[in-house]
Image (tube, helix red, strand yellow):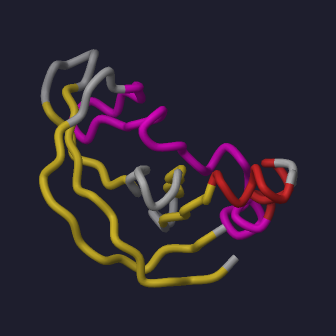
Amino acid sequence: MKLKRLPISHCHANCERCGLPTEFRMFESGAGGDFVTYVAKVTRDLYRLDVNKVRSTGTNLKDILSPAYEREGRAEFLMEIPKQVQCKLCGHVFEPTACGLDGEEFVDAYEL
């Protein structure tokens, strides 16, 4: 697990409970690779998992995530984005059916 400066997208989606938009950041998948974004519930640190690397090495997902679990305390302290977006207003955790893109920035994130 290495801390790197990585590009991340600013996204938004409407909460399925309260209907209001909430913002979140996510590493985009595309021609350059497939990525999964994890955000820590307590520290708010970001983790990027390269799915192609997982497939090519045949490594178990739990083993790859174990350094992040150790750093954050427990597996439950990581949320997989966009499957687990937390509404900033009502706190509801949901999986958006659609999300909008609002821009991009570079952030320090842990590459798994």
Locate the C terminus by quadrant. bottom right
Q: Residue at point 15% right, 59% down?
A: 103
Percent of width and height locating residue 82: 42, 38
Asked whether 70 falls inside the magenta stretch, the response is yes
The reply to whether residue 41 is in sight is no
Range of magenta residues: 67-95
Q: Is residue 112 above or below residue 69?
A: below
Percent of width and height locating residue 65: 74, 57
Asked whether 92 or 8 is in front, the reply is 8
Residue at the farthest top position: 17
How many badges with numbers are in the image? Answer: 0
Image quarter for residue 69?
bottom right
Asked whether 24 or 75 is in front, the reply is 24
Q: Residue at point 86% right, 49% down?
A: 60
Percent of width and height locating residue 38: 53, 53
Asked whether 9 or 33 is in front, the reply is 33
| Residue 47 in the figure: left or right of residue 44 | right
Asked whether 11 falls inside the magenta stretch, the response is no
